[in-house]
Amino acid sequence: MRAMRAHLIGFALLVLAACASPQIQELGLAINEPFLEGDTAVMADGARLPMHVWTAKKPKAVIVAVHGMNGYAQDFALPGPWFAANGISFYAYDQRSFGRTAKEKRGLWPGGEVMVSDLKSIHALLKKKHGKLPVYVVGLSMGGAVTMKALDNGLAPDGAVLVAPAVWGWRAMNPFLKSTLWITAHVAPSYAPTGQSLDIWPSDNIEVLRAIGRDPLYQSKTRTETIYGLVTLMDDAYDAASRLKSPILYLYGTKDQLVPATPTYDVIGRIKAPKRVAVYKNGWHMLLRDKQRKVVWKDIAAWVKNRTAPLPSGEEQKPKKLAQK
């Protein structure tokens, strides 16, 4: 018995000795004020964040779009032109670590604070560029979590659209998943699984999923320390929900296999800001790219142009009823 106990203690010490804190990108020193340079947003530390831009001829509003995990501005390649054609200029940028940003840092978690700082800077730049036009933020999945954290830290857009925001943080996970992720992120932080064995479908649009698979700028592997950072960000978003003040349009699909319904409905119930909620019976996680995507686009456009108007889809839900599910 003593020999076994000594063996276990020795093993534990070896594991602890091998532990390393999950890494995040270091924010560089400020060398300039953030500015726009063509289709690129240059941050205070010189980081260059490429953008996709779709400009309306006579815009009535502006949208800043924040992409999801392992994606980039291409996440909005389908809705962007449609919004521009319907009077809403649309800007989508690559967040640090993703898409066309600096290759040497790609895949290394940028940290929630840096992601929030970048969103606030880009929002301010577009607000200045477009004068009196209202500027809205659309956050998709991880981008929704970034948006919620930013709203809790000084971001004040005319409104925010949360599209299946990632809110499945530490407190919503079961103990086994928590401990497994913590150990893996600290013992093997650079281990990068693909997740293909999970058999999770983010959308019913097979053509889009195939295009993502062919696009080298979409990341197919995710370091465990990055997953650890994402879960922490999701936890921050969950915690921020009750303190949000900007008007919110919250969108979710009943077929979402990535963000569970329980924490989603919990978060919706905790939002005290003016809010409207649509739950799409045929919606998956990629609501803006599903087969019924135009139904979602029309709801967003209607809300941006008039936050009190009925949503065209007819799938608006009363938050109190969702909290009871």
Image (cartoon, rainbow, N blue to C red):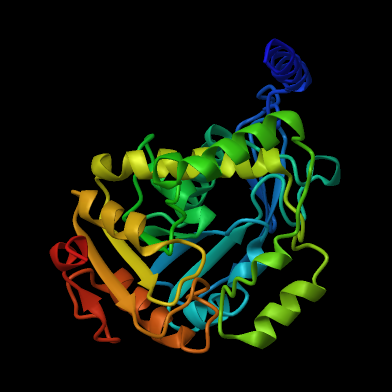
Nearest to the observer: residue 305 or residue 247: 247
Q: Is residue 63 above or below residue 56?
A: above
Name the spot of residue 311 as percent of width and height, x first: 25, 80
| Residue 23, above or below 69 | above
* Residue located 41% across and 85% down the image: 282
Image quarter of residue 136: bottom left
Quadrant (top left, top right, bottom left, bottom right) of the C terminus? bottom left
Q: Quadrant of residue 2?
A: top right
Image position, residue 283 (x, y; %): 43, 80
Task: Let me know if residue 27 appears in the view.
Answer: yes
In the image, 184 versus 216, the foreground residue is: 184
- Residue depicted at 37% across the width and 83% down the height: 298
| 98 with respect to 300 (left or right) | right
Query: What residue is drawn where x is 46% and y is 71%?
Result: 256
Percent position of residue 260, x then y: 42, 62
Residue at 48% x, 84% y: name it: 293
The residue lying furthest to the right in this view is 104
Quadrant housing the N terminus:
top right
Depth check: 282 or 102 in front? Answer: 282
